[in-house]
Image: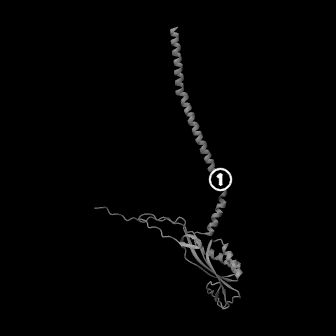
Amino acid sequence: MEKMRQWSMLTAVGVVAVLAAGWFLLVSPQRSQAADVRTQATTQLSANASLRSRVDQLEQQKRDQPAQIAKLKKFDAQVPNNPELPTLIRQLSAAANGAGVDLVGLAPGQPTLVTAVSTGVVAPAVAPPATTPGATAPAPATPLAAIPLTVNVQGGYYNIENFFRSVEKMTRAMLVPGWTLCAISPSGSAAPTGGASCAVPSSGASDKVLPPGTLNGVITAYVFESPQVVAAQPAPVSPVAPAQ
């Protein structure tokens, strides 16, 4: 009887030991592995969601690409990367012909880098700070050059007014800080109106008879260009002689 009880106790202890060993050797690692798999699955689902969101954004950008390209072309026409004076002259000539005025003077100036354009004032570019030898000079973030322009037309009041309106609708962006309008006498000299003063340029046709009521209009304006930025090259460093 006593041996039977001992064998029963030993059997119970053995069963408990087998169960414990099975738990630590088989069940617990599997549970840990399953937890890792669930964590990886959650991470992958989150990554997939983020990737789908990015794909949706790219698809939307692809659909918007034609409109963005059209905007860039519009901006490029308004502020080109070079003076494009021939195109500007053609546009002004077309505006003058459409308005029925004579384009008797067109004088562009040299481009000048500017830092700001506001209330009709073009600020000159600020000189870059001095750099140490061997350092690369920083390039301007958004270079903008202003080209001064003086436009002189002659014609009737309403024709000059139509010319001014056509200039406002030109493809090329133009800033007009001032203009003058003068009556021209039969002799060809300018009679300033309203205290304004303007000079009538010589058009090369001194024998041309101007009809009564002809006015002389002068526009002082700026057109702009955005020159391409060229990366500054580092200044050469002179070799230093070794100390004796």
- Measured along the vertical axis of the image, is residue 4 above or below residue 139? above
Instruction: Please give the name of the residue rendered at 50% of the width and 9% of the height, measured from the top-left corner.
Output: 3
Please indicate, yes or no, whether residue 44 appears anywhere in the rendered image: yes
Please indicate, yes or no, whether residue 218 appears anywhere in the rendered image: no
In percent of width and height, residue 215 lies at 67, 84
Instruction: Please give the name of the residue rendered at 61% of the width and 45% of the height, measured from the top-left corner.
Output: 48
Outermost residue on the left side: it is: 244
Q: Is disc 1 surrounded by few (<14), some (14 to 19) or many (20+) residues within 10 Å?
A: few
In the rendered structure, the answer to whether residue 215 lies left or right of residue 11 reads right
- Measured along the vertical axis of the image, is residue 136 above or below residue 14? below
Residue at image mark 1:
59
Instruction: Please give the name of the residue rendered at 68% of the width and 75% of the height, measured from the top-left corner.
Output: 166
Instruction: Please give the name of the residue rendered at 56% of the width and 36% of the height, measured from the top-left corner.
Output: 36
The answer to which quarter of the image holds residue 238 is: bottom left
In percent of width and height, residue 121 lies at 57, 73
In percent of width and height, residue 139 lies at 50, 65
Nearer to us in this view, 195 or 62: 195
- Measured along the vertical axis of the image, is residue 21 above or below residue 1? below
In percent of width and height, residue 15 lies at 54, 19
